[in-house]
Image (cartoon, rainbow, N blue to C red):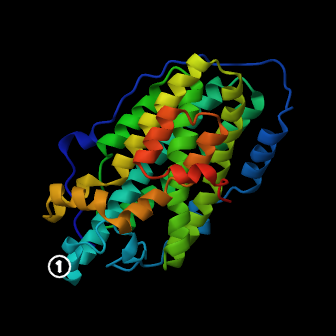
Amino acid sequence: MQATLELPKNATEPYKWGVELDAFMSESYDFGDDSLNAIYQKAKANQWDVNVDLDWSRELDSDNPLGMPDGTLLIYGTDVWNKLDAKGRAEVRHHSQGWTMSQVLHGEQAALICASKLAVAEESLSARLCAAGQIMDEARHIEAFGRLVNDKLPISYPMSQSLKSLLGDTISSKALDITNLGMQVLVEGIALSLFQSIVAYSQDPFIRDMVTRIQRDEARHFAIGRITLCRVYQEMSATERKEREEFVAEGAHTLHEHLCADDIWEPMGLSKKECAHLVRNSPVTSSMRRSIFRRLVPTIREMGLLSPRVQKVFEQLQVMDYAAMPLPA
Ligand SMILES: [Fe+2]
Ligand SMILES: [Fe+2]
């Protein structure tokens, strides 16, 4: 096991965002929301235990802990990659996988905060029960990814500036639907596509088992956001919707920047400027990054938020063709 990358001094300081919200309590115990009730019932039936259900005794490949093919690496196939020897390529895998799993872990902690906010402030009792189920799911995901990053991967990373900015806006918004949109649709939509790629490509049975279980939980969270927000945005005025469209446009752009992982090159002694350029211009990596948006784009269309401004951003990111596609299973 290699030494953990030294984190910036402020990485040990907790991030703080103000959250203002009204707690909601009803004396009507009406469980009348069939779609959300079905998700809550599924959440109870599908609970699992990180300690009991995963085989933590399994050793991961020290050169490629997640067992992912090199074609999924951001600089694969470029001149920089082609010049690296076996040791250099293993280092790229370590940094890339350590960075990705660290960002997922930070996202899981933010998801716990957002689900807690929904449990307090959603008006519908069914929506609050779904959020309560999600809180336990997110606690489990923090436990699983935390243990993976701490015990099984050689390197961990602090939150990227892009992710920190999107999570801050999502957590601190006074509008509950924006917290729901930022976390359940944007962040979870991207995470779910990433998890699907890991399950499809990883050669490691432990990683596949862990991510398959988490992916099943995340699909419920994404469905909660989709069902709730499709209804909310149908009723919303054009002016209020415009603010949400702006949030989606900015959020999609921020997530794209985040996924370029600009923080990992310098710690390996590679040029940040050269790698950032390669990552944004290599056809191999752009197809991987594009595919991460395959769930988000049709959902935004379905919610009625595909305004000209949002379309323009999706076109810049070369993901607009997903708008004509159905939501993947
Ligand atoms: Fe999660
Ligand atoms: Fe989640």
Residue 46 in the image, given as x and y percentages of width and height = 72, 57
Residue 97 in the image, given as x and y percentages of width and height = 36, 65
Residue pictured at 48% horizontal, 24% vertical? 173
In the displayed structure, does residue 142 sit left or right of residue 221? left
In the displayed structure, does residue 153 sit left or right of residue 220? left
Would you identify the image quadrant in which residue 36 lies? top right
Tell me the quarter of the image containing the N terminus.
bottom left
In the displayed structure, does residue 10 sit left or right of residue 38? left
Tell me the quarter of the image containing the C terminus.
bottom right
Secondary element at tag 1: helix
Residue 254 in the image, given as x and y percentages of width and height = 38, 41
Residue pictured at 35% horizontal, 48% vertical? 258
* Amino acid carrying mark 1 in the image: Lys
Q: Check the image and report above or below for 197 versus 31.
A: below
Count of residue discs? 1
Residue 257 in the image, given as x and y percentages of width and height = 34, 47
Is residue 132 in view?
no
Would you identify the image quadrant in which residue 121 lies? top right
Is residue 21 in view?
yes
Asked whether mark 1 lies closer than 8 Å to ligand 1, one says: no
Residue pictured at 43% horizontal, 56% vertical? 146
Q: Check the image and report above or below for 128 versus 37.
A: above
- Local packing at callout 1 (Cα closer than 10 Å; few below 14, some 14-19, many 20+) is few
Q: Check the image and report above or below for 210 versus 68.
A: above
Residue pictured at 49% horizontal, 36% vertical? 310
Of residues 122 and 69, which is closer to you in this image?
A: 69
In the displayed structure, does residue 293 sit left or right of residue 236? left
The residue identified by callout 1 is: 83
Of residues 26 and 313, which is closer to you in this image?
A: 313
